[in-house]
Image: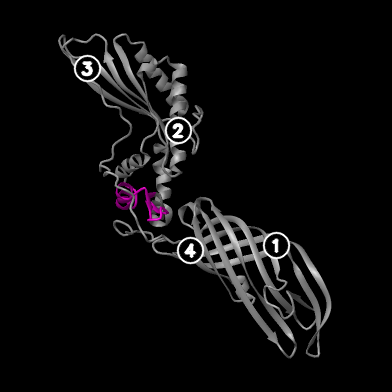
Amino acid sequence: MIRFIALIFLALGMQTTSAQENDKEVCIEFRVGSSVLDPNFGNNASNLNDVIKFLNEIRNDNSIELTKVTFCGSASPEGDKARNIKLAQNRCASMEQYVRQRINLPDNIINRQEWSDSWRKLAYYVEHSDMPEKKEVLHELLETQEYTYNKQGKLIDSRKKRLMELNYGRTWKYMLDEFFPSVRNASAILVTLRKKQEVAAAPVVETPVVEEPAPVAETPAQPEPIVDNKSSAYFALKTNMLYDALLVPNIGVEFSLGNRWSIAADWMYGWWSRNKSHRYWRIYGGGLSLRKYFGAMAAEKPLQGHHIGINAQMLTYDFEFGGTGYMGGEPGGTLWDRMNYTIGAEYGYSMPIAHRLNIDFSIAAGYMGGRYYEYIPLDGHYVWQATKNRHWVGPTKVEVSLVWLLGHGNYNTKTKKGGEK
């Protein structure tokens, strides 16, 4: 956005010079994450023309002197702070370059505010809205530390995380749609115009630099970061319902690592046989997955939405239904003896179905290797037919898991006043 305010002095009498403040706001839009000023984006073309026209009128008016022009840049607070500061500086520079290429402005009247507090701007827009959860949002914006660390210096909480947890992320999405386009801006602020023919006794009036609209409630002084020994935990228990349907009991756990990364582990164990027909159904083993979640749903709540990652498994098995049997792993050995293994890439989608329940659809594909044995059951004995090495490339895992989300305060729609202490 471009915001400019011109203070114009009018002669109200022969011996008196007075000032009348005239506010005018013109918005210049930037794409998310971009500092490129695109005149063809949104209403930028007409709004930029307004800015240039206004400055030309002032420069061509011999009765008024332009004494200060301030360019101010900022960015919405949803991203990394260091990156946002750099983005705001670049937007400020883009705004200044565009204007000064078209209007000759002397260096001595140029002032730059390359970074402004986007959280305060967001609080201003929330205060003057009728949005849902307004009271809770203002509490987090004005009273919650931006970052909270424990005694070891580990980040355990943040203002952004708490806002994203409100109302299943719907409150955060509302602000993204309604307020963030206005917070995400670069601004040119024209501060002081002075009448050249002033009466000597008339004081020179100058308005303060307007960096941003002030919120109704004043932000308290920022104390030192809160030290909290209690870490927020994002994790889930789950079971693969496809394995359950095949009578292979299994359990898994997944932990959030922050920044939409997670690590998951699972274990399965099934051993069924019918001695009369000598039928075996045996499989046990486990695996690990490293996942990265992405998409709009992943921004609302941890461990949901689209995800990609890598998956590795180790297992042993024995399948035989009255004919030729196939045994993976060393006969009579343990999982570690000649185990079979897989490694591959996975893709999935975790869909919420209740307050703390998701269904996770995933598939992994890659390479499966290891030694396996072919045998025929005969008179209560195994008659070995062949020993082979497996080299399989293709699907290595299919998952339709019921996921139970756990943790203290991670998935609530509301938080207690003051939050967790």
In the image, 314: left or right of 350? right
Please name which of the two marks, 2 or 3, marks the residue nearer to the observer. 3
Mark 4 or mark 1: whose residue is earlier in sequence: 4
Q: Which residues are magenta?
A: 130-159
Could you tell me the amino acid type at mark 4? Phe
Q: CA distance from mark 1 to mark 2?
A: 46 Å
Residue behind mark 2 = 29
* Relative side of 346 to 40, left or right: right
Q: Distance of mark 2 from mark 4, alpha carbons?
A: 39 Å
The amino acid pointed to by label 1 is Pro
- Mark pair 2, 3: CA separation: 35 Å
Q: Residues within 10 Å of mark 1 (few under 14, many from 20)?
A: some
- Judge depth for marks 2 and 4 and give the one in front: 4
Give above or below for 21 relative to 405: above
Q: Note whether residue 247 is visible.
A: no
Residue denoted by label 1: 395
Tag of residue 235: 4
Quarter of the rendering containing residue 389: bottom right
